Image (cartoon, rainbow, N blue to C red):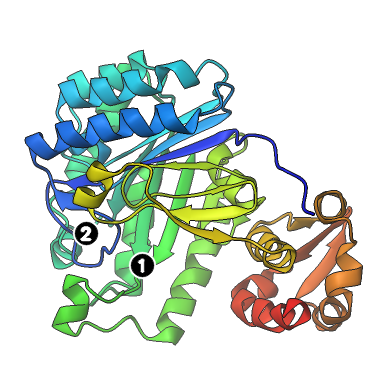
């Protein structure tokens, strides 16, 4: 029998509201409506109480959607609901879209202990921003950072997308320069994907050519590492001391609470997903679609998440968690990739080399055979 895990020390809360819907987005979202926001806040309050959330959390992350699409009063109410759980929190992050933050909301964030903000910049090119359905400009991004710094929140990350329709290497280079001019401690860079049920999918928009996307990724790595950013995870870069503590919990495969419509969580060998329907969540905040995880599920998912990080998988922790060594489970397949210089054993970890990072999905597909 798999032993019970300790209570999660990490919490993700999903805010489903946005002022408008971006053309590439398939996250749980609805256009902001004050009446629905109040009902949603009541449902969140109920869920927090019923889940008996650990009051010694290490991180809280509020994402969306757009948390700052809430009114100042609603944002205050939400953060008040989380106040009982933040006494030990080291990193408290809220996602912000430029144009939705003002001095009052920034002061509310600061007053409730938020010490890090993730800003959805996406591009420095205003025409490309329009192309993907964003309602802000790069000047709005600059103003947003100014508001945060004025409020005393100086730790921030910028989200940037590449492989956008019509985007050139010069566009990307200019966006990186714009982002670096703001002096972020952290950057997350993602290639455009086009899920079903998005505006782009309905319009038949195609992702960027694979070769161009690969060239863009290599250019991003070269530029940011050349400016002192550590490429600590496939899509993430940080100055010293600025890694995301919360996201590292995901990549280490730690348990975490998922609160709110559209949120996912993992607790005690069960992964659960809240319904993406806001109406369904409000009617029953405790309703989830649960997936019990077998030992083989957990061993592979732990490997899959950990290999995204520069340090890779901690093999000592793997044995402590599952009662079997990494080499016993994955050693044969791992050796093949080590021989071909895609993986490496180092300091009791197994990790990807730089070229291994570029074909991680292929490596993982091969390793999956060992636990099926």
Please give the name of the residue rendered at 69% of the width and 36% of the height, measured from the top-left corner. 6
Mark 1: few/some/many CA within 10 Å (<14, 14-19, 20+):
many
Q: CA distance from mark 2 to mark 1?
A: 12 Å
Q: Secondary structure at mark 2?
A: loop
Q: Nearer the viewer, residue 34 or 42?
A: 42
Please give the name of the residue rendered at 74% of the width and 63% of the height, measured from the top-left corner. 295
Q: Is residue 274 left or right of residue 40?
A: right
Q: Position of residue 269 (x, y in %)?
A: 64, 52
Mark whose residue sits in front, 2 or 1: 1
Please give the name of the residue rendered at 16% of the width and 21% of the height, measured from the top-left corner. 73
Q: Position of residue 275 (x, y in %)?
A: 32, 55
Q: Which of the two labelled residues, at mark 2 and mark 1, occupies the earlier sequence position?
A: 2
- Answer with the quarter of the image where residue 78 lies: top left
Q: Position of residue 283 (x, y in %)?
A: 23, 44
* Residue 173 visible to an observer of this rendering: yes
Please give the name of the residue rendered at 69% of the width and 56% of the height, measured from the top-left corner. 310
* In the depicted structure, whether residue 364 falls above or below residue 77: below
So how many labels did they put on this image?
2
Q: Is residue 260 left or right of residue 91?
A: left
Q: Nearer the viewer, residue 42 or 299?
A: 42
Q: Secondary structure at mark 1?
A: strand
Q: Nearer the viewer, residue 218 or 105?
A: 105
Quarter of the picture containing the C terminus is bottom right
* In the depicted structure, whether residue 198 falls above or below residue 227: below
Q: Is residue 191 left or right of residue 66?
A: right
Residue matched to label 2: 125
Residue 162: numbered disc: 1
Q: Position of residue 141 (x, y in %)?
A: 24, 42
């Amino acid at each position: 029998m798999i032993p019970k895990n300790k209570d999660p020390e990490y919490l993700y809360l999903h805010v489903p509201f946005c002022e408008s819907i971006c053309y590439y987005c398939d996250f749980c979202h609805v256009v902001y409506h004050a009446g629905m926001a109040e009902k949603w806040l009541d449902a969140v309050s109920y869920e927090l109480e019923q889940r008996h959330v650990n009051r010694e959390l290490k991180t809280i992350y509020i994402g969306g959607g757009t948390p700052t699409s809430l009114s100042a009063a609603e944002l205050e109410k939400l953060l008040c609901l989380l106040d009982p759980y933040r006494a030990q929190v080291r990193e408290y992050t809220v996602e912000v879209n430029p144009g939705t933050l003002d001095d009052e909301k920034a002061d509310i964030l600061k007053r409730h202990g938020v010490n890090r903000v993730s800003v959805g910049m996406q591009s420095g090119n205003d025409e490309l921003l329009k192309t993907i359905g964003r309602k802000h400009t790069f000047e709005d991004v600059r103003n947003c950072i100014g508001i945060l710094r004025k409020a005393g929140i100086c730790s921030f990350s910028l989200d940037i997308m590449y492989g956008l329709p019509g985007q050139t290497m010069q566009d990307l280079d200019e966006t990186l320069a714009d982002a670096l001019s703001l002096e972020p401690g952290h950057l997350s860079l993602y290639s455009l994907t086009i899920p079903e049920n998005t505006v782009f999918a309905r319009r038949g928009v195609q992702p960027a050519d694979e070769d161009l996307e690969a060239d863009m990724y290599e250019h991003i790595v070269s530029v940011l590492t050349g400016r002192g950013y550590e490429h600590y995870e496939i899509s993430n870069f940080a100055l010293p001391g600025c890694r995301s503590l919360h996201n590292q919990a995901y990549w280490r495969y730690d348990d975490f609470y998922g609160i709110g419509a559209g949120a996912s969580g993992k607790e005690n060998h069960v992964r659960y997903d809240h319904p993406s329907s806001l109406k369904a969540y409000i009617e029953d905040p405790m309703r989830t679609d649960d997936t019990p995880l077998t030992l083989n599920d957990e061993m592979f998912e732990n490997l899959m998440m950990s290999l995204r990080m520069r340090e890779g998988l901690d093999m000592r922790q793997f044995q402590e968690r599952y009662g079997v060594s990494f080499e016993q489970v994955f050693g044969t397949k791992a050796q093949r990739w080590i021989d071909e210089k895609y993986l490496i054993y180092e300091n009791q970890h197994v990790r990807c080399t730089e070229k291994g990072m570029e074909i991680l999905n292929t490596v993982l597909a091969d390793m999956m055979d060992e636990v099926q």
